[in-house]
Amino acid sequence: MRRTRFSLWGALAVGAIAAAAVVAAPAAPALADNIDPGTPTSLTIHKYAGSEGGEGDGSEIADPSGLGTPLAGVEFTITPVTASASGPIDLATPAGWERASNLTPADVSGGGFTLGTPTIVTTGADGSIASALPIGLYLVEETDPGENNVVSPVDPFLVTLPTPAGGGEWTYDVHVYPKNQLNATAPQKTVSAPDGFVLGAPVTWTIGAPVPALNQGAAYTDFTIIDPLDARLGFVSATIRTPGFTPGTDYTVTNTADTVTIALTATGRAQLVAGAIITVDIVTEVESLGGDGVVTNQATVRTNGAPVLTGTASTNWGALQILKHVSGDQTDTLADAEFAVFSDAEATDEIGTLTTDDTGTAEISLWAGNDATSERSYWVRETVAPAGFILDPQLREVVVPAGGAAEPTVLAVPNAQRTGPDLPLTGAQGQLWLSVAGVAVLAAAVGAALVVARKRRQQH
């Protein structure tokens, strides 16, 4: 923390501030008795985002456009410092300036000083707030950064009202310009292809967490990655891949209520360098499809209490159902047909085997892609046909899109029934008697026809 010292005659410097932040240290007059107690004094805080620079002189900056982005909603506590252990701090007297000499904010906060009633103020839309305050010495502390994602708040500082302006003059309306470093990083989240294509294969999520810059002299007091897992994910492990970080020494890993937390320890935070990227791998297993089969994940990277969300990544899965049936009738299903499932068209990478049940169906859950890719081709071949049916060796391609288990992609595979050997009609002896009987019938028919013909001739 910067030390803000007061000379015997009231020279003032204010620490932990941004460019043109607060009061510089011009030489004060030999005595403080030319301060006009009838002139109103005030303190205006102008809050900006950015890195700090040199000290200001307490005057208002006419064109603040180059200072950065104004920060609204930042709370400050302004506390009068009215006395030290040796007596009152009355800035209308040389003794008061004497007692204020060589003080730092840490001195005042450490005890032994009499403090007045604090004034709590919050910056407005333009990042500023003005407060009319009596003559005196004040400790100014940033007590709440608001919704500004601050990673490096301004350090407490001391300011006098009025402030020496040099040449025996005083600035009664003092303007200070403290700056905060924001967590403006953009951490990334990616997901790898699973180590296998079937549900339950390990899936690795990778977080790239940039280290934000801090104000000069500030320290990293917190660097934590928080990853709430989808209910369909089972946690396996988490490690920091960046070289130099040892688990248990430089960081800890916990998994509580499906939320994985990787927190750097003091020794780990000591290795952080602004602009570096800390890479974290979280390994999970997709335990079920559920919903639409799209399993998303998003993490938070928190630095010094300021959280930033990563992008969202997803691993996508779908269900494949094989329906085995008699050729020509899909309602006549067949059990005990066996199939092999392949990830490639050459059928060299077998990833699963299936056997149809009493309903003629068999199911498998398969990876369909990551992020915007939500479908993938697989190949299926029958390896064992049901008893009494002909094996179908055809290698069939099927596209499996992301989807829940309730809506599988169906691949219908027909089987033709086998035919038996040719059966004799009634045997050889039966065929002989059929032949004799046939001749007899034929002869009788011919005889009858001749008799009818003869009778007709006789009648004529």
Image: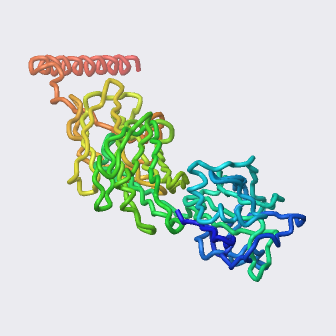
Near-viewer residue (61 or 434): 61
Q: Would you identify the image quadrant in which residue 358 lies?
A: top left
Q: Is residue 30 above or below residue 360?
A: below
389 sits left or right of 72 in the view: left
Quarter of the image for the C terminus: give it: top left
Q: Is residue 16 visible?
A: no
| Residue lying at 79% horizontally and 74% vertically, measured from the top left | 170
What residue appears at the point 23 percent right and 53 percent down from the top-left corner? 347
Q: Looking at the picture, does residue 41 appear above or below residue 411?
A: below
Q: Nearer the viewer, residue 172 or 203?
A: 172
Measured as percent of width and height from the top left, residue 386 is found at 24, 31
Q: Name the residue nearer the viewer: 290 or 80.
A: 80
The residue lying at 45 percent from left, 56 percent from top is 189
Q: Position of residue 396 (x, y in %)?
A: 32, 49
Q: Position of residue 382 (x, y in %)?
A: 25, 41
Q: Is residue 34 above or below residue 150?
A: below
Horizontally, is 327 left or right of 132 in the view?
left
